[in-house]
Image: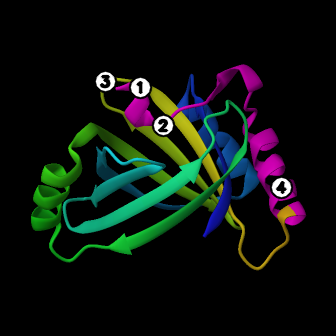
Amino acid sequence: MKNLEFKAICDSLDVLRGRLVNLQAEHRRTMKQLDTYFNVPQGRLKLREINTHEVQLIYYERSDLAESRYSNYQVCDISEPMVFKQLATRAWGVRGVVEKQRELWMFGNTRIHLDEVRDLDQFVELETVIHNQTEGEAQAEHQLVKDALGIKEEDLLSVSYSDLV
C-alpha cells in the first residue's frame, strides 16, 4: 500500500474539528492507541493496540522530511499480541512507546487523524491512500484537505511520534 502523508503540530483540535465539519469530512471513530516501536534495520515497525482489543503490526518506509511525502506500508492483524510483543521485544528491542487518543475523520481517500499524544502535544496527520486513483488525483485531494484545514508549512514535522518521545 502507498499513501501521501504529513504530520503537523496543532494549536487547537477544536478549530480543526470545525474546519472538518465545513469540509464535510466524516467522523468515523475516536480510539485510544498504544504503539510499541521496535528496533529494525530499516523503516519503522510498530505494534498498534487499539482500544485494548484490536491489534495490528504495521511496517512502513518513508523519508523524514517536513513536507507531504510518500509512505509505503503494510498492515497485518495479530491474533496473539502479547506473545508477539514478547518475541519482538526479545528479538529487536523496543525503540519507543507512544500512547495517544486519536480521532479518525475521512474525506474521500484521505484519513485525517486528530491526535492527542501523551507527554507531547496535539497533532494533525493526513494520509491520502493511493487507491483507485492516480497519484495526481491523490495529490490534488491531499492538497485540498491540507488547505481546508489551514495547515502552515512551518507546523509540519519530519519525524515519527516515536522520535519525539
Amino acid carrying label 2: it is: Ser
Q: Dot 3, how many residues are within 10 Å of its Cα: few (below 14), some (14-19), or many (20+)?
A: few
Tell me where residue 105 appears, x and y as whole percent: 57, 57
Q: Which residue sits at x=53%, y=32%?
A: 159
Circle on res. 164: 1
Expressed as whole percent of the image width and height from the top left, the position of residue 69 reads 71, 45
13 with respect to 79 (left or right): right
Q: Which residue is mark 2?
A: 160
Q: Are marks 4 and 2 in contact (CB under 8 Å)?
A: no
Distance from the alpha carbon under mark 1 to that under mark 3: 10 Å
Q: Secondary structure at mark 4?
A: helix
Q: Which residues are magenta?
A: 136-165
Q: Position of residue 163 (x, y in %)?
A: 42, 30
CA gap between label 4 and label 2 equals 21 Å
The disc, 4 or 1, on the residue closer to the chain's N-terminal end is 4
In the image, is residue 44 above or below residue 161?
below
Label 4 is placed on what type of residue?
A: Gln
Mark drawn on residue 119 = 3
| Residue type, mark 1 in image | Leu
Q: Earlier in the sequence, mark 1 or mark 3?
A: 3
User: Which kind of residue does numbered mark 3 sit on?
Assistant: Asp
Whether residues under marks 2 and 1 lie with C-beta atoms below 8 angstroms apart, the answer is yes
